């Protein structure tokens, strides 16, 4: 394992606050690398009065001297990326070939992918998956199909792109008309738009895998930034209510083009409670006043979609599963401040189905869909904790809560976040100082 590197992943159903943690670690890194997902990710970074919502651009972009890499495993949406770049530049953030590198092998989200997402969800009706309709799943499906895939490198040759788009659009138009009665897409307009995107992106497009392998050989520290959360992993999440890529630390080598030894120290980000967006089982959900209170205090509305998130108590069973899966070394506990003011707080320490305790955890099994939580209650704490900058400055009950999570998870809480700003961060039992 290369201890100079760090991988930051979410251990729940996404929205854990990975952007803030990556931003906090980025100043120690030479590169920050996105290796999975696409514009369905929403990473929020707050610097003083400024709040940045990042979707495709890695969260190291706000640090001078840091190279930001969009790896081959990302479903890359050129118009979205260029819009995000323009928005950052308007706010004085430097973005260009000197600090943003897009892999030529990354697959491109095309208009037919978004159409497929929307049309499929509409057809599923009440059985819909709750996708963000950003075209991510259909993009990865075409990646596997291969003959209908477009990659970032294809955008750099307008003539070859035109031939490919016309051929694929003919297939997609026929398919959508037959399945959904949809109107045909204008292939020529798509060629024109995406060729223009290619021209603008060209200085930033490169073989990022080779670049990162050179950095590893030179001993330059890298921070790998996961998208979504581990319970949404295509293979290991709560299937079928998942995303379409490998979002755990297991996805770093293939999604970034680096050897497994490059993953480095793994930081698992957890909220002090649990949230979920869209459909799917959620044993710890509190569809009541408790859940509503958490939602409002935590501003639990999607960064990407604006949808209200389902909220509940911390689920240690599910989080321990994902931590074990990725070999998490330490935890980053965020949004602890949201639980301030609760007289009692609860933690799910086990599952029960039909009156019997459940051994182990199968996220796609029928038992999980019917599981009821076994809770342990702890004392809550009064007053706000957003000004705390050391562990000792937290109320005794808040410290007990952190220690209880450490004991359940079998890992130290290295970082504690008590607010959205960079400064509202407590470095606790972390070993990241040696990066």
Image: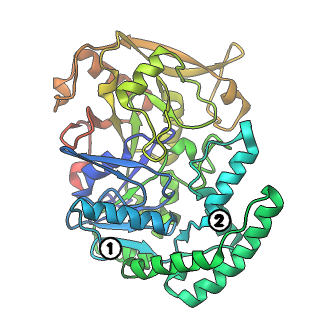
Left or right, residue 393 beside residue 215: left
Q: Is residue 423 above or below residue 264?
A: above
Examine the image and state in which quarter residue 109 appears: bottom right
Nearer the camera: disc 2 or disc 1:
2
Location of residue 208 (image quadrant): bottom left
Badge 2: how crowded within 10 Å, few (<14), some, or many (20+)? many
**Measured from the top left, where is residue 157 in percent x and y?**
52, 88
Q: Position of residue 231 (x, y in %)?
A: 55, 41
**How far separated are the C-alphas under marks 2 and 1?**
36 Å
Quadrant showing the C terminus: bottom left
Q: Indicate which disc residue 112 carries.
A: 2
Q: Who's the residue at 26% across and 32% down the image?
A: 418
Mark 2 element type: helix
The label on residue 215 is 1
Q: Is residue 117 above or below residue 268?
A: below
Residue closest to the eye, 215 or 372: 372
Q: Nearer the viewer, residue 94 or 422?
A: 94
x, y percent for residue 227: 46, 52
Asked if residue 26 is positioned above or below residue 385 in the image, the reply reads below
Seen from the viewer's position, the closer of residues 2 and 88 is 88
Q: Which mark is residue 180?
A: none
* Residue at the limit of the structure toward the right, as seen here: 178
Which of the 4 image quadrants contains residue 264? Answer: bottom left
């Amino acid at each position: 394992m290369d201890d100079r590197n760090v991988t930051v992943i979410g251990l729940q159903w996404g929205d854990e606050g990975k952007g803030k943690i990556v931003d906090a670690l980025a100043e120690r890194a030479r590169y920050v690398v996105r290796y999975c997902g696409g514009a369905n990710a929403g990473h929020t970074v707050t610097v003083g009065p400024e709040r940045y919502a990042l979707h495709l651009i890695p969260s190291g972009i706000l640090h001078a001297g840091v190279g930001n890499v969009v790896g081959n495993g990302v479903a890359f949406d050129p118009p979205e990326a260029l819009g995000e770049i323009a928005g950052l530049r308007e706010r004085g953030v430097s973005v260009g070939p000197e600090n943003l590198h897009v892999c030529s092998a990354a697959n491109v989200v095309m208009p037919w992918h978004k159409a497929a997402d929307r049309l499929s969800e509409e057809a599923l009706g009440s059985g819909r998956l709750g996708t963000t309709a950003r075209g991510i799943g259909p993009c990865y499906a075409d990646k596997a199909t291969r003959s209908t895939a477009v990659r970032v490198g294809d955008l750099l040759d307008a003539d070859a792109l035109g031939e490919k788009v016309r051929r694929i659009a003919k297939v997609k138009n026929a398919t959508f008309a037959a399945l959904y009665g949809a109107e045909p897409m204008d292939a020529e307009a798509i060629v024109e738009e995406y060729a223009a995107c290619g021209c603008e992106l060209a200085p930033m497009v490169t073989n990022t895998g080779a670049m990162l392998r050179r950095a590893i050989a030179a001993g330059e520290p890298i921070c790998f930034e996961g998208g979504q959360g581990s319970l949404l992993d295509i293979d290991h999440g709560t299937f079928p209510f998942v995303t379409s890529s490998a979002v755990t630390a297991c996805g770093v080598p293939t999604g970034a083009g680096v050897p497994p030894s490059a993953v480095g120290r793994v930081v698992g980000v957890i909220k002090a409670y649990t949230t979920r967006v869209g459909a799917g089982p959620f044993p710890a959900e509190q569809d009541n006043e408790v859940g509503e209170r958490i939602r409002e205090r935590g501003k639990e509305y999607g960064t990407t979609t604006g949808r209200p998130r389902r909220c509940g108590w911390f689920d240690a069973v599910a989080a321990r599963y994902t931590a074990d899966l990725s070999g998490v070394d330490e935890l980053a506990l965020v949004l602890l401040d949201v639980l301030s003011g609760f007289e009692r707080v609860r933690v799910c320490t086990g599952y029960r189905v039909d009156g019997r305790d459940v051994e182990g955890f199968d996220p796609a099994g029928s038992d999980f869909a019917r599981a009821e939580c076994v809770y342990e209650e702890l004392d809550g704490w009064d007053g706000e904790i957003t000004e705390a900058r050391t562990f000792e400055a937290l109320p005794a009950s808040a410290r007990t809560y952190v220690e209880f999570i450490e004991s359940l998870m079998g890992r130290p809480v290295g970082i504690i976040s008590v607010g959205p700003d960079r400064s509202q961060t407590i470095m606790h039992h972390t070993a990241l100082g040696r990066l």
